[in-house]
């Protein structure tokens, strides 16, 4: 393979192609990034902050293009307008807290001693970004890495081939040097070799569990800092005192938006038995109202899945569940072509012996189970190899906090879901991976502590 091809889920055509760089070319990119890193870090912090702010604003000039290109590349309907809102929110928050977060921790400044801890950049940061929210996931690390004084090499997903280019174009246009932020096109083999050579000081990867394992194995023995966000099977729990309409609207949107292709999308729902029938009835009515179709059409509310193999996995999990006794509530949409265009589905009579309640689906399908107690819900929510987010629905914050403390997950929401708050650490546990992005902790992971102990006399 000498080039990468983005196959559009709209019609299966090749939307964009880019030539792969060779290992030797990639090594030269790393060398250039390392050669300019010290000078970049030596620039005033406020200068780096303002350059990143300017790059974000430059992307904001292209929102119509962003929405159109994302529709072609990964199928999200243009009616949703791209990703600039979340992209800007995350980047600007990290810019706002940079000076405070990166300031030295002064332990003592007396006539006898100067003792402090400073934060130094890691060096060269390697970002491997996914296709499902390609701008927002990339900016999570890109903005704070550059602000903290690192140089960045970005490898974006083949499915969203143009996104890395657009980011590089915008950031270079406002004055960030070309070698400080490089977008390059790599295959898996070259990527693995670069990591195994210790080319990078920190790696941030978002993607599958299998790919995350491969990256960690490649990095073994290099002592490179590796941060991963991998699979998810995020649960929602609707208690008997929940606002039913809000729970249905939010959880089902969390399960179905972006054709279910959300890192923290809702993939399983547990509803107290007193609300179960009403919840399912309202959920079925909502999903039945969706308009599946070409994402370039304004009336489309749910577009195709990004790739036919993703759609086939969802179909396989759904078919297996039905064969094992699950009930499918949504009749096949006329637009379902057996390919990337997939009917959104709600399943009941499901259990945890089914893949649909255990394996990541990453598509527009959700299983709903009835529960009789908090204890049962907690056991089921924790019965997963993954742990990214969980969503609790109740009017009782104390009860929710008691439950939250028992959940094995990175984030617990109450009366909301499927949202990334840049002020909070984005992290997971179990097979979802390790590390933490955004928030003050995001800066800690993109820098290293350096202690100063000076005796003055």
Image: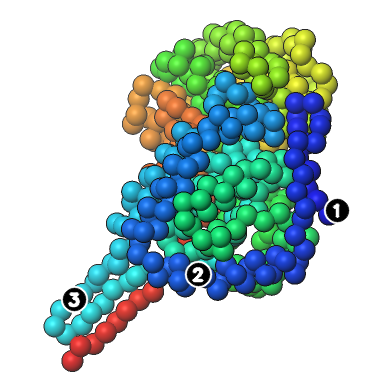
Residue 345 in sight: no
Against 193, residue 438 (above or below) is: above
Task: Tell whether 70 sits left or right of 389.
Answer: right
- Which residue is rendered at x = 59% and y = 32% of the image? 65
- Can residue 96 be seen? yes
Q: Residue at x 45, y 16 (%)?
A: 246
Is mark 1 in CB contact (under 8 Å) with mark 3?
no
Q: Are marks 2 and 1 in contact (CB under 8 Å)?
A: no
Instruction: Find disc 2 in the rendering and name its residue.
Output: 37
Task: Between residue 405 and residue 452, name the one nearer to us.
Answer: 452
Q: Residues within 10 Å of mark 2 (few under 14, many from 20)?
A: many
- Distance CA(mark 1)–CA(mark 3): 59 Å
Residue 368: x and y in percent read: 62, 21
Secondary element at tag 3: strand
Which residue is tagged 1? 1
Sequence-earlier tag: 3 or 2: 2
x 33%, y 31%: residue: 398
Q: Residue furthest bottom?
A: 457
Q: Which mark is residue 109?
A: 3
Q: Nearer the viewer, mark 3 or mark 2?
A: 2
Q: Is residue 49 above or below residue 42?
A: above
């Amino acid at each position: 393979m000498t080039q990468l091809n983005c196959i559009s889920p709209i019609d299966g055509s090749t939307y964009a192609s880019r030539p792969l760089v060779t290992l030797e070319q990639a090594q030269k990119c790393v060398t250039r990034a390392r050669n300019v890193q010290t000078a970049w870090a030596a620039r005033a912090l406020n200068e780096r902050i303002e350059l990143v702010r300017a790059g974000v604003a430059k992307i904001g000039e292209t929102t119509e293009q962003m929405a159109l290109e994302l529709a072609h590349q990964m199928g999200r309907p243009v009616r949703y307008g791209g990703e600039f809102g979340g992209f800007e929110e995350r980047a600007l928050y990290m810019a706002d807290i940079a000076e405070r977060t990166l300031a030295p921790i002064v332990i003592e400044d007396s006539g006898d001693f100067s003792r402090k801890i400073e934060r130094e950049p890691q060096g060269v940061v390697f970002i491997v970004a996914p296709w499902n929210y390609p701008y927002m996931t990339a900016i999570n690390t890109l903005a704070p890495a550059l602000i903290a004084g690192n140089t960045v090499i970005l490898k974006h997903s083949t499915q969203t081939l143009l996104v890395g280019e657009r980011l590089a174009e915008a950031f270079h246009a406002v004055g960030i040097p070309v070698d400080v932020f490089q977008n390059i096109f790599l295959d898996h083999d070259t990527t693995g070799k670069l990591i195994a050579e210790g080319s990078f000081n920190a790696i941030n990867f978002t993607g599958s569990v299998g790919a995350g394992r491969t990256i960690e194995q490649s990095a073994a023995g290099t002592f490179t800092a590796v941060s991963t966000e991998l699979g998810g099977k995020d649960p929602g729990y609707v208690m008997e005192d929940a606002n039913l309409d809000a729970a249905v609207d939010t959880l089902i949107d969390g399960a179905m938006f972006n054709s279910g292709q959300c890192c923290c999308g809702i993939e399983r729902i547990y509803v107290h038995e007193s609300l179960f029938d009403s919840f399912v009835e309202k959920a079925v009515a909502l999903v039945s109202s969706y308009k599946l179709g070409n994402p370039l059409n304004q009336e489309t509310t749910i577009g195709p899945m990004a790739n036919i193999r993703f759609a086939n996995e969802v179909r396989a999990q759904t078919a297996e569940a039905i064969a094992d006794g699950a009930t499918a509530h949504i009749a096949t949409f006329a637009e379902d072509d057996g390919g990337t265009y997939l009917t959104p589905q709600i399943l009941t009579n499901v259990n945890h012996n089914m893949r649909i309640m255990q394996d990541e689906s990453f598509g527009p399908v959700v299983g709903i189970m009835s529960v009789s107690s908090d204890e049962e819900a907690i056991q089921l929510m924790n019965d997963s190899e993954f742990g990214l987010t969980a969503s609790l629905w109740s009017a009782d914050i104390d009860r929710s906090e008691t439950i939250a403390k028992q959940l094995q997950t990175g984030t617990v929401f109450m009366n909301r879901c499927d949202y990334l708050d840049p002020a909070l650490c984005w992290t997971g546990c179990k097979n979802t991976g390790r590390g933490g992005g955004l928030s003050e902790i995001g800066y800690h992971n993109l820098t290293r502590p350096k202690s100063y102990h000076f005796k003055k006399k």
